[in-house]
Image (cartoon, rainbow, N blue to C red):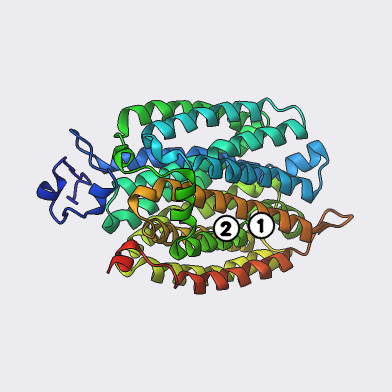
Amino acid sequence: MPESGKTSLFPDAAATVPGTGAGSEIIDCGAVPDTETIHEWPVLLVLAAVQFVHILDFMMIMPLGPVFFRLYDITPQQFGLLVTVYTLSAAACGFMAAFFVDRFDRKHTLIGLCAGFTLAMLLCALSINYQMLLCSRAIAGMFGGLISATVFSIIADLIPQTRRGKATGTVMSSFSFAAVAGMPAGLFLASWLNWRAPFVVLAALSLLIIFAARRLLPPVKAHIQVHQLNPINQLKKIFLVRNHMVAFLLIGMLMFSGYLVIPFISTYMVTNVGMHVNELPYLYFFGGLFSFFTANLFGRFTDRFGKRVMFGILAMLSLAPVLWVTHISEASLFVALAASTLFMILVTGRVIPLMALITAAVRPHLRGSFMTFHMSMQQLSAGLGSLLAGSIMDVTAHGRIMHYDTVGIVAAVITVIGIILATQIKTVEELDG
């Protein structure tokens, strides 16, 4: 790739793109448009923006936990359900969509999902009670989970594998930007106006992104010409392949372990560690600020040292903050921020090489369906993790959360099993070699 960050891909790519041949993945997957040049960075920036708004939507629910506890007089189990309904809805809709998602231009699919997401944000802002908010979060999950699957499918279709780790890190750095800029801004709006304001702003941002996507994203549709499978054969091609099943199991375990802990960090920091509600933006700001830089660094390391090696290293290192965050008691603001920042750096960072590894484990013509099933598994596991954590924990008469340390131990054990499991995944190149 030239230093400018521009890559030209032409119809006769086997002859015009150095280093590619008739079996090149970028040709097989239909990443080569008919007449236009692909500029990678505008594409990645649009995809990162899409990830930003839907990740910020999911993240905003968590620091608003204390508000909902007070406003709706809910229990930890009900709050866990508020988080879980999003993920379960995403899992169910993702599973159904996986049968036909590869039949459409991924650009048009992404734009349509963003339109639905915009509507869901407006419904969240208009919710007048817990039940309506719960339904609105389910609708948001219908589109949010599919958005992630489509984003990563586009990355895998357009970006050659030699740069895919860096590209994945670039798009995933949107999580960090959401924490650094989005969360403090959203919490400021929530305290200045009310909790509905962040969702109105997200709806407006989503509309702007739709216009940008229409202009900047190239068509991603040549995969449609590849032979289409009927639903039964599609299930066989995806679920009767051992490599695919290992990938599903691995992402399920990692998301399950992460979301045992993640949804309750904000509430635990307030009720048990001693942080003030007004200090919560610092938690996300510093965690996101450091993660913003480390995400790109981890992406580069993934391309340099290998996906499997980097995942093993980062997953092993993540055990320390998982146990630290869940076992910390009353502490200074500095200690609380150090624990939460390290948690965000490593728990989100380990997903970068994992996603690069998983997208390389499936053949291009199955990638859209595979990634949609994959995201369904991811969302289902996250939801089940939140539910299990909520069922394990309890609240004392003084409002303190109990048994969060037990949740941390369970999360650490599952992470270790995941590290071992990752050694069993093979890329398409390894399988063909």
Which residue matches tag 2?
Answer: 255
Q: Secondary structure at mark 2?
A: helix
Where residue 272 sits in the image (x, y, percent)? 76, 59
Could you tell me if residue 86 is visible in this image? yes
10 Å neighbourhood of mark 1: few (<14), some, or many (≥20)?
Answer: many
* Residue 48 occupies quadrant: top left
Work out which quarter of the rendered image holds the C terminus and state it.
bottom left
Where residue 267 sits in the image (x, y, percent)? 71, 51
Which residue matches tag 1?
Answer: 385
Query: In this rendering, would 145 be left or right of 404?
Result: left
Q: Secondary structure at mark 1?
A: helix
* Residue 319 occupies quadrant: bottom right
Q: Amino acid at mark 2?
A: Met
The extreme right residue here reads: 397
Q: Are marks 1 and 2 in contact (CB under 8 Å)?
A: yes
In the rendered view, would you say 283 is above or below 126?
below
Query: In this rendering, would 314 be left or right of 9?
Result: right
Query: In this rendering, would 401 be left or right of 135?
Result: right
Could you tell me if residue 182 is visible in this image? no
Separation (CA) of disc 1 from disc 2: 8 Å
- Comparing 204 with 123, the one in front is 123
